[in-house]
Image (spheres, grey):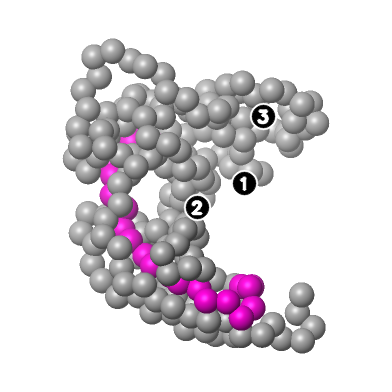
């Protein structure tokens, strides 16, 4: 069950409850029309039950829903990048290794995405430069809605998605953030569960002196 509260004229606070056995987490979505299009705000850990959506368009209807997502994650790989910021020389590189792609492999068995046998294998992280990593893995999932690349910076508490990829992708290059010099990474095929009810809120006028 999802509810939304207007905590200021242009700020929304969402809260939800309900069980989702076996889920990896929940996605939180919004739209400005009852039938969408819908935009994903966040991939929330399963234990998270609230979300704040700030600085909204004044005097506008907003619609919200949540739904669980499922799929088994690969074993993580640890990556330590060389020192150095993202340089102008790196920015000028074509990074032809980075776009998501599908590397065809013969003889790979696949399973429905929610089964343990759909777990990605052979996840490898190749350091391309001081701020770039190319990931490759073997895709065993069928019927997935896409793949999530998740990371946990060294010292962080849990994994969070850093990239959402199309189905059947098994190669992707990440340009990292400063706090990702030392991090663990994993990949997860995913599919969605049932949608929650739709919660609606209308924003007010923006307060004077704000924006």
Residue bearing the label numbered 3: 130
Q: Quadrant of the C terminus?
A: bottom right
**Label 3, label 1: how far apart the Cα atoms are:** 13 Å
At a point 27% along the width and 33% down the height, the residue shown is 141
Q: Which mark is residue 82?
A: none
SS for dot 3? loop
Q: Does residue 65 appear to the left or right of 40 in the view shown?
A: left
The residue indicated by pointer 2 is: 156
The quarter of the picture where the N terminus appears is bottom left
Residue 136 drawn above or below residue 167: above
Q: Toward the viewer: 191 or 73?
A: 191
Q: Residues within 10 Å of mark 2 (few under 14, many from 20)?
A: few
State yes or no: discs 3 and 1 in contact (Cβ < 8 Å): no
At 22% from the left and 54% from the top, the residue drawn is 22
Image position of 208 (left or right of 72)? right
- The residue nearer to you, when weighing 67 against 73, is 67
Residue 127 visible here: no
Q: Residues within 10 Å of mark 1 (few under 14, many from 20)?
A: few
Asked which secondary structure carries label 1, the reply is helix
CA distance for labels 2 and 3: 21 Å
Q: Is residue 72 magenta?
A: yes
Label 1 to label 2: alpha-carbon separation: 10 Å
Percent of width and height locating residue 191: 30, 47
């Amino acid at each position: 069950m999802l509810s939304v509260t207007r905590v200021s004229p242009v700020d929304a606070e969402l809260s939800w409850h309900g069980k989702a056995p076996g889920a990896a987490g929940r996605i939180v979505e919004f739209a400005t029309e009852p039938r969408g299009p819908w935009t994903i705000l966040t991939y929330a850990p399963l234990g998270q039950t609230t979300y704040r959506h700030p600085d909204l368009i004044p005097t506008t209807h907003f619609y919200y829903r949540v739904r669980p997502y499922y799929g088994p994650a690969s074993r993580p790989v640890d990556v330590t990048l060389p020192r150095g910021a993202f340089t102008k020389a790196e920015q000028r590189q074509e990074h032809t290794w980075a776009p998501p792609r599908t590397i065809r492999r013969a003889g790979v068995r696949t399973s429905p995405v929610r089964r343990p046998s759909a777990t990605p294998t052979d996840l490898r992280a190749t350091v391309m430069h001081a701020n770039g990593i190319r990931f490759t893995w073997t895709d065993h999932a069928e019927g997935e809605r896409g793949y999530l690349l998740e990371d946990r910076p060294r010292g962080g508490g849990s994994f969070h998605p850093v990239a959402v990829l199309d189905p059947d992708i098994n190669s992707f290059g990440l340009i990292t953030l400063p706090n990702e010099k030392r991090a663990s990474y994993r990949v997860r095929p995913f599919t969605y569960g049932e949608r929650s009810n739709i919660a609606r809120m209308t924003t007010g006028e923006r307060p004077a002196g704000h924006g």
